[in-house]
Amino acid sequence: MIPWDKLHGAMTHFPIALLLFSTACDFGSVAFKRRPFARELRTVSFYGLFAAALASVGVVVSGVALTKGQLWGRGDLLWHHRFAWPAFGLVVALAVWRLVVRDAMSRTGWCLYLLLMAVGSGLVAAAGYFGGELLLGGG
Amino acid sequence: MLTSLEIKGAAAAVASSALLLAATFAAGAIYGDRQRLVRATGEPGASAAIATQGRGFFFQSCAHCHGQDADGGEDAPSLHKLQISGAHMTLVIQSGIKDEMPSFSKRYDGQETAAIVAYLKTLQ
C-alpha cells in the first residue's frame, strides 16, 4: 500500500519551492539586468521552472490518488483544487513555452512571461496554503 | 509585438497544458468512479461489477424521475445520502411507495434489485 498522504505531502514542496525560486530569479534578472550574473539568473530560472513542471506531474498523480479521484471536493479541499488546477496548467504551459522560445524572447513576450510567472506563483502559494489548512487547520 | 516563435511556443504551451489537464481529469474521474464502487461494495472485483450493472438498471428505470446523477427531480427526491439500510432500499424498490413510486418487483428480480441497491450505496 502506497502512503499517498506522505508522498503528496513530501512531493508538493518541490514545485512550490522551485516555482517561487524560478520567479525570484526571473525578477532578479530584471532588477540586476546590468550585472554579469543576470543571464545566469535567467538560465537558473529556466531549469527551476522546468523542474517545477516535472515535479508538479508527480504531485498531481499523488494528489488524485490521495483524494481517491476527488477532483474538486468541498471546503478547503475545493479551494485547494480551485488554485491547484489552474496553477498546474499554467506551470506546464509556461515551461513548454520557455522550452520552445528559450532566450529568444521579445520585450513583450518577456513581460507577459514575467506576469504569468507571478500569477502562477500566487496560484501555487494559495494552493499550498489551502493544502496546509487541510492538514493542519482541521478543515 | 510577439515574434512568430513566441506565438508558436504559446500554441504548443496551451495545447500541451490543455491535453495534460484533460488527461488528468479523465483519469481522475475514472479512478474516482472506481474508488466509489470499491468503497460501497468492499472489494474491487465482482462486487464492483454488480454495482456497475445496478447503475445500468438505474439509468433504465430510475433516472428519469430521480435524475441522471440521482440528485432528485421535480417529483422525486435525491438518492444521495440516504439514511436507510440496504434492506429498506430493496423493500422500497420491490414494493414501491403508494401514490409516489411504482413497484419494480415484476421488472427486477432479487439479484437485479440487489445490484441497484449496490449502486445506490455508492452514492452515499
Image: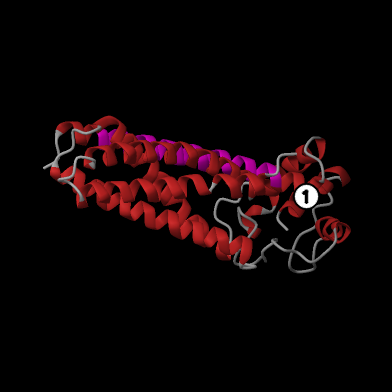
Q: Does the magenta-highlighted stretch encompass residue A139?
A: no
Q: Pointer 1: what residue?
A: B40
Q: Amino acid at mark 1?
A: Ala
Q: Which residues are magenta?
A: B9-35
Residue B76 versus residue B20: which sits nearer the camera?
Answer: B20
Q: Specify whether A103 is left or right of A49.
A: left
Residue lying at 81% horizontally and 56% vertically, measured from the top left: B93
Residue furthest left in the image? B1
Q: Is residue B72 visible?
A: no
Q: Residues within 10 Å of mark 1 (few under 14, many from 20)?
A: some
Q: Is residue B26 within the magenta segment?
A: yes
Q: Is residue B49 left or right of residue B18?
A: right
The x, y position of residue A72, in whole percent, is 54, 55
Q: Quadrant of the C terminus of chain A?
A: bottom right
The chain that hosts pointer 1 is: B
Q: Is residue A2 left or right of residue A94?
A: right
Q: Residue at x 56, y 64 (%)?
A: A76
Determine the secondary structure under disc 1. Answer: helix
Q: Position of residue B70 (x, y in %)?
A: 65, 57
Which residue sits at x=45%, y=41%?
A: B21
Q: For residue A1, which quarter of the picture?
A: top right
Nearest the eye: A106 or B32: A106
